[in-house]
Image (tube, coloured by chain):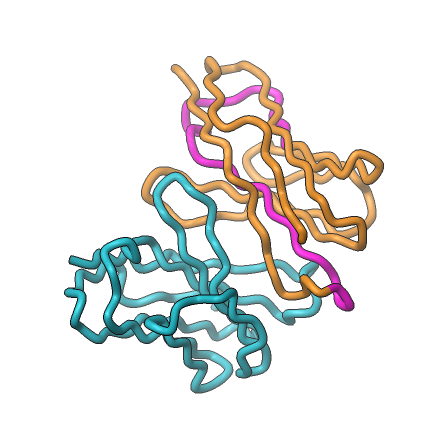
Chain colours: A orange, B cyan
Amino acid sequence: AQSVSQHNHHVILSEAASLELGCNYSYGGTVNLFWYVQYPGQHLQLLLKYFSGDPLVKGIKGFEAEFIKSKFSFNLRKPSVQWSDTAEYFCAVTSERGSSNTGKLIFGQGTTLQVKP
Amino acid sequence: DTEVTQTPKHLVMGMTNKKSLKCEQHMGHRAMYWYKQKAKKPPELMFVYSYEKLSINESVPSRFSPECPNSSLLNLHLHALQPEDSALYLCASSQDRDRGSYGYTFGSGTRLTVV
């Protein structure tokens, strides 16, 4: 079955530090990859997504992610975090037409990011 | 209109009650989804509707009953729930179930408490 792994469960950084959150997925076919953010008490917001083309994807709020097909990875990065980036971050994957997992958006376990002012 | 609207935002119900959650979108999306999210956990897929037909049921207990009356509306009927069913219930929509590249739009959720 398709799965998503996020290696970092809880990350604590100081403001201005650089961020990299790991995400690996298990499915070998054509996939679409997403990073969502959930601020405390709020709903899921899409940070960025990848479905084809340039493997380096830029999203909102200065976030970017790199798709490395050979490593089944889609890591999220930000050069300099702010206190307002404190939130839960979820990597998610869905597969394209023809897969038994079509229609399923599967989430990783999430990473709690705490940024200290 | 680029939103998914869920009502109510909060719901407290007893274990013998019957209640319904409502989800609405007017983006012309033909796939709609119900997810359940417990605190500090990722959303878990419950149901997928494609063109108003149920296409995926992730082995959800029958006390949860989904309904898609039309292409814009998705309901989740609740009956005889247990306290462990307390969670945030999220609705989402996408243009087409078979093309994940189109992306997904999530609603703000209904926070359900079963007492």
Residue A110 spot, x, y in % from top left:
50, 37
Residue A87 is one of the magenta-drawn residues: yes
Regarding residue B31, the answer to whether it shows in the image is yes
Residue A85 is one of the magenta-drawn residues: yes
Judge whether A90 appears above or below B25 on screen: above
> Would residue A94 be found to the left or right of residue A89 on screen?
right
Front position in the image: B54 or A16: B54
Judge whether A102 appears above or below B55 on screen: above
Q: Please report the residue visible at 50 percent of the width from the left and 28 percent of the height from the top.
A: A9
Judge whether A108 appears above or below B26 on screen: above
> Would residue A32 be found to the left or right of residue A15 on screen?
right
List the single residue furthest toward the bottom: B69
> Would residue A34 be found to the left or right of residue A36 on screen?
right
Judge whether B24 appears above or below A111 on screen: below
Q: Please report the residue visible at 55 percent of the width from the left and 83 percent of the height from the top.
A: B53
Q: Please report the residue visible at 64 percent of the width from the left and 71 percent of the height from the top.
A: B96
Residue A88 spot, x, y in % from top left:
45, 36
What count of labels does the image hold? Answer: 0
Q: Please report the residue visible at 48 percent of the width from the left and 54 percent of the height from the top.
A: B44
Residue B94 spot, x, y in % from top left:
58, 66
Write the start and end of the magenta stretch as one range: A76-99
Residue A38 spot, x, y in % from top left:
44, 42
Classify the position of the C terminus of chain B by image quarter: bottom left
Regarding residue B3, the answer to whether it shows in the image is no
> Would residue A54 be found to the left or right of residue B83 on screen?
right
Front position in the image: B94 or B13: B13
Front position in the image: B78 or A19: B78
